[in-house]
Image: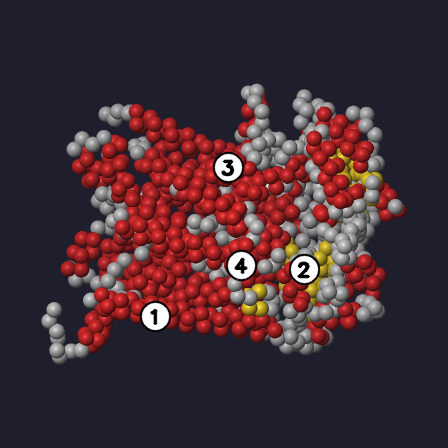
Amino acid sequence: MRAKAEKPAWKRRWRKRMRDYYNYRYAYLLVIPGFVYFLVFKIAPMWGLLIAFKDYSPFAGFWQSQWVGFKHFAEFFTNAYFYLMLRNTLVISLMNIVFFFPAPIVLALLLNEIRLEKFKRVNQTIVYMPHFLSWVVITGITFFMLSSDVGLVNKVIVNMGGEPVSFLSNPKLFWWVLLLQNMWKEIGWGTIIFLAAITQIDPSQYEAATIDGASRMQKIFRITIPSILPTIIVLLILRLGHVMDVGFEQVLLMGNPFVRDVAEVFDTYSYNQGINQGNFSTAITVGIFKSVAGLCMVVASDRIVKKMGYSGIY
Amino acid sequence: MNSHIRKIKVRKAGLLIGLCLLLAACGTAAPNAADNAGQGAGAPAANNSGTQTAAQTSTPAPQEPLVIRGMANLYNQAPAKDSEFWKAMEKEFHVDYTVDWVPADNYQQKLDLVLASGDLPDLMQITNITAPSILKAVKAGAFWDLTPYLGDFSKYPNFKNYTNQKAWILSKINGKNYVVPRTRGNLDSALFIRQDWLDKLGLKKPTTIEEFAEVMKVIAKSDPDGNGKIDTIGLIPSPGYFAAAFGTRDPVRDANGGITHMVLTSNYADYVEYMRGLFEAGAIPKEFALIKGTQQEEMFMTGRSASFVKNAWHKYRMEQENRKTQPDAKVTLLTHLEGPRGYAHIWDLGFFGGMAISKKVSEEKMLRILDFLNATADEKYYNFVNFGIENVHYVMKDGFPSLTEEGKKVVNSSFNAPFIFSTAEFAKVDSPLAPMSYNLETREEPESVIIN
Amino acid sequence: MKRITYGDVIVYTAVSFISFLCVAPFFYIVSVSLTDPSVYVPFKLYVIPEKVSFMSYSYILSNPNFLNSLKNTVFVTVVGTALNIVFTFTMAYGLTKKGMPHRGLFMGVVIFALLFSAGIVPHYLLVKSMGLINSLWSLILPVLTNSWSLIVAKSFIESLPEELEESAKIDGCTDIGIFLRIIVPLSKASIATLTLFFAVGHWNTYFNALIYLTDSQKSTLQVYVKTLLVDASTGGAGSTGMVDLLNIPSETVRMATVVLAMLPIMAVYPFVQRYFVKGVMLGSIKG
């Protein structure tokens, strides 16, 4: 390492820095508009997070509301139902990640294997239709199907000589009902992004594989899946960032007195506090908790993924 | 080289933190501005962006129409500002009234946000005066305290003569009148039952809750709709209504003289016992808690359940709907079943929320708004505010307004939302769909309640 | 000639089955929406309408508010989505430049925004302070882009072969030139995908429209649709004995609104599908 006697070290770094700025000037041009958006609309409102440390009263405003430090957090963590909500939230979320997350991938792969173009197109369109239904409608349909008093499914079961199954009031089945609802609604829509990723695969790879005598399954596992793996990983990490989010509207609508123990999640608690009790501070407190948990998951998973040799989201 | 990298990292982190602090400082300046606007009381309302009305003057000349910006609940299609009805209303009362219509489901949420922004409309409908955010807002001085101005109502004869006086007492917050209550009669909810089924099964119309329970059990075990299946539901518990028969509507004091919540009293426990008996006898469906409001209604309307609790005026519609599948259907009201410590009935509060005037308007404007509210509360305007313009939207038949074709298209229950109007005792009993004779008959049933 | 393999059978059966499950409830929805309200009975299973009537649809469409709200929604969707794509892809491409100074700061902000949200109140105050209350732009500007889309777009761009960029640089192309002439044309699939996501997002906006728009002339489709259904759901909790129509918005109207709200955006997908073409060098589709 030759020491440069003429120029001081900091000046050298400054020169390099200026050169970098110049080299990347267009990149900055491209980034700045979006970045300004983020600063204005996402970062600036973050003062709202401080509401969690106050006893916020809407009309009185931010400065008039009393400062209460960590009181809301303490109340939240010592709440009798905290562990219950934690358990419910985590179970629902993890079930989603384990069962639901791979489903659109599988369906995308299946769709990709279809040779008849028309058949593929028609099915693609059909399969994402449920995404457009609101949870209100889906809950109605679910009730129509699964109610033990008037439900279609139970009518069939009874006709075949069985006893009606209380799908909707049995706490043990609640989580599964939620999962199936979610899968039905989103599986089609979820394939879109994977199909897009598949289209970016160079077809000549498949040609070469055919020449080498590869079977269909081999092509899927050796070409298709590895090619879309970066997309899968990015989506997985993004999903983990919202590990504490469980589809608030769905759980709220499907909840009923029978399944309260398994249906109470952080979001429903926060909703009750915020809307029904006018307690904004608690809502923000819960939000911060969820966000911090999500942050830990993102950082951790990004690191793991990088160690495995893939590029993360950073 | 490592220390070099570390220094860069430290500098980066410092830059990041500095930037965040800077933004936070800028950000906190924003709520400051909003708060100041909110706290200014008595000063002429700032011309906030987004208002559709002309700039509000602080001292409108008496000849100029009173400009009001409002916010009210929406159940369906809102009357447009340039519609016949609205223009006629504005002319009659000499106002320029613009309303922000908010769907009922989300009204409370938007209300809270509006309060948070400090940018209140001049006149706001408050649906739930006990909501914590409202109470907090009152404490923070968001609304005019109307008590001294109302006084003994000598200046507001319509309020005194045509509205439910109890409502003025019951709608006080912290002992003062902050809202002008939207009053209505005390008769509202009733218990519907399928009279034709009672007749078919040879059952007497029940007058006590024990008799009612017996009737329900019998119905649940038989097949009154004749479809070959024992699947008829007796009832779906409507909390509060039946519980009243056990005395739950009387306040129960605890050791310190405070009031115990209804659900914690022994009266309520008796009510639960009663319901449990019905549940075990099969009169209540197994998954009753799943069946939400509209579905309960649909079950009664399609002849799947024998009884139902709702506003009395739905009786006509219920009958018509049932007649689609069972032409002999007849629905009657069981207005008050006798119980051990009371009657199964809810004597309505007498008002449905109220209207509050923002403290940001000047005193003079506030008084003019009160005058406006008083004006619309005159009895002679009741039909106007509820049914529209006579001979355009409705005609009088047998002394009762009946909607015309035009009226049926345009008029709905949102019409009266931004107004205060006089109280009609049987407003919730008469059905505008039914002929007047039917309504008169229906009126007789709950009338006995008043006598009691 | 094409042989039908066992694999084919499995694939076609599985896909058909899933499709059937997805579409089955729609038979009910569509047939109820076409059923004459006077004969409709709740809880009955309809596969085909008992008595066809377009009354529910005409009830919705004949209202002048419907066309108005449709106009507003279309405006927001078209303008909003266009801006979304521009802001998202420019920033995403810029962020793929790993050597850019302060890149860490930018990414940090993006990830922070992904995970932390300040809640409704500060956003409402911000929109108010910008004078956007009751303007349709309140539905466009606050959502110009979002972290999730950014990261996905960035990931797609990064999956493009690096050699293309390098060879363009050697030819003397500037960054912006590369972006416009190489990246964008090659990103058709991801641009199409995100266009779809953004468009659907704008189309379905309900809550933001609810709180930011005060003039019923400015309301959007979903808000309008909700007003048709509120009465039915709260059981007409209005004050005096008012009833809207001969047939109160019943299930038939509710189903009709579901269909109407879905149709337009579903029609967009087939157009977008065009861009889901395999590979850069489009060869013929192999059997």
Which residue lies under the disc numbered 2? B126
Q: Which image quarter: residue B143?
A: bottom right
Going 51% across and 56% down the picture, which residue do you hit? Answer: A286
Tell me if label 1 and label 4 are in contact, CB under 8 Å. no
- Which sits earlier in the primary sequence, circle 2 or circle 1? 1
Q: Which residue is mark 1?
A: B14
Res C84 → quadrant: bottom left
The one nearer the camera, B138 or A134, is: B138
The mark closer to the camera, 2 or 1, is 1
Residue B332, by quadrant, is top right
For the residues beneath circles 2 and 3, the answer to whether they share a chain is: no
Of A52 and B177, nearer the camera is A52
Instruction: Report how many numbered discs are placed on residues in the image.
Output: 4
Q: Nearer the viewer, mark 4 or mark 3?
A: 4
Q: Which mark is residue A177?
A: 3
* Residue type highlighted by circle 4: Ala
Q: Chain of mark 2?
A: B
Query: Percent x, y for residue C249?
Result: 63, 43
What distance separates the C-alpha of mark 3 from that of mark 1?
A: 49 Å
Q: Which mark is residue A74?
A: 4
Which residue is at the far top?
A161
Q: Label 1 neighbourhood size at 10 Å, few (<14), some (14-19), many (20+)?
A: few
